[in-house]
Each structure stands twice: as C-alpha cells, then as structure tokens.
Amino acid sequence: MGWNSSVVLIANKTIRQVEKALPDVFAICDRQINWEDAISSALHPHAAIGEIPGWVALWSQNDQLVMFEEFLESASRGSRAVVCLQASVNTIHGFMVYENGKHCRTLVRENYEPVADVGRRLKEEASVTWDDDEGTVFDEDTVFEVVRLLTGVDVANFDTWEGVKFNVVELT
C-alpha cells in the first residue's frame, strides 16, 4: 500500500499548546474523524489533530503545513517534533526532527535518491537500511522505522490509532 499522508508527532504537549503554534490560516474545528479519515486524501488541504499517550499527532497531506519551519520551531519548544513524510504518488519519503525549537535533522528522498540531507545523522538511522543487497529500495518502510525508533510510535499501525478521535484542522 502506498502512503500519501504525513504526520507530525509532538512530544509531551497538549492539542491546545500545538494549536497555538499552527499558522493562523488553520483553525481546529469541532468535527471529529477517525484515523482512516485523518490519513485520507479527501481531507486535503486540511489536517487532523489528535492525541495518543505522550504525543500530539497532526496528520495531513499538506506538505506546506507539516514542513513549515515556523510551526515546527514553535511546536517543538520545550519538546521534540518528529515529521514523517510520505508521498508515494510522488515517491517522496523522509523525516525531520526539531528539538527545543531548533532544527536538528532532515532527510528527504525523492525517487529513491536523497534530495535533502541536513543536520548530523542520528544514531537511530544507523540501524536502518535504505536498500538491500539486490538494490530493492525501502524508503517508505525505512522512514516508518526511523520514526518508530525516534518516538516509540508505530505510526503505520492501525492499532496505534484505534479509538483515537481527531479534530479536523481546516485551512480557512
């Protein structure tokens, strides 16, 4: 299955705290949806925000939101924000890490080649493989694994999100 939705995980914050960091063109509304709807292409250009223990999750296909530097800096102050980028249609996969308001690491691959490789390589990256001995590329799965190692959250697993209600974050 190809993934075409990205997620920002923000540690030890509340939805209200993350809401303050959102660009002012976005507003959290009362409409709630489940995870399957939160990752659906039908949600674009909006987003969905919800909580699991220890993390606020913001799902969206809107790359301008999930990669917006000012949002990530603000959301990660006193915390950590980890972005999992997945756009299988465009063959773009990657991750970003912000800690305490500062950018630490970005690795984005397009068509299986690095297009952004910024910051010091993280120790969690050492244990993952981007391709095997036969050249089979694992960008999508590898990004999910790096994010799991960084956060402890298996973002691609339905069980992680079962029962979580997400509020729609509308682009106004």
Image: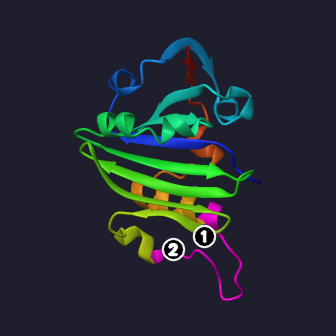
Counting every numbered tag in the picture gives 2
Q: Give the residue drawn at x 60%, y 18%.
A: 32
Residue 125 or residue 111, whichever sits in front: 111
Locate residue 41 relative to residue 16 in the image: left or right: right
| Residue 143 horizontal/vertical position (percent) | 55, 61
The image quarter containing residue 158 is top right
- Quadrant (top left/top right/bottom left/bottom right) for the N terminus: bottom right
Q: Give the range drawn in magenta.
A: 127-141
Q: Give the residue drawn at x 65%, y 70%.
A: 138
**Residue at the front extreme of this rendering:** 115
Q: Is residue 1 visible?
A: yes
Identify the amino acid type marked 2. Answer: Val
Q: Give the residue drawn at x 48%, y 18%.
A: 25
Q: Nearer the viewer, mark 2 or mark 1?
A: 1
Q: Give the residue drawn at x 66%, y 36%.
A: 39
Within 10 Å of disc 2 (Cα), the crowding (few <14, some 14-19, many 20+) is some
Q: Which label belongs to residue 5?
A: none
| Residue 77 horizontal/vertical position (percent) | 25, 38
Overall secondary structure of the magenta stretch?
A: loop
| Residue 23 horizontal/vertical position (percent) | 42, 24
Labels 2 and 1: the sequence-earlier one:
1
Per the model, the C-alpha gap separating discs 2 and 1 is 16 Å
- The residue indicated by pointer 2 is 128
**Residue at the top extreme of this rendering:** 30
- The residue indicated by pointer 1 is 113
Say if 91 sits above or below 40 in the image.
below
Residue 3 or residue 152, whichever sits in front: 3
Residue 163 or residue 19, whichever sits in front: 19
Q: Is residue 54 visible?
A: no
Q: Check if residue 139 falls in the magenta segment.
A: yes
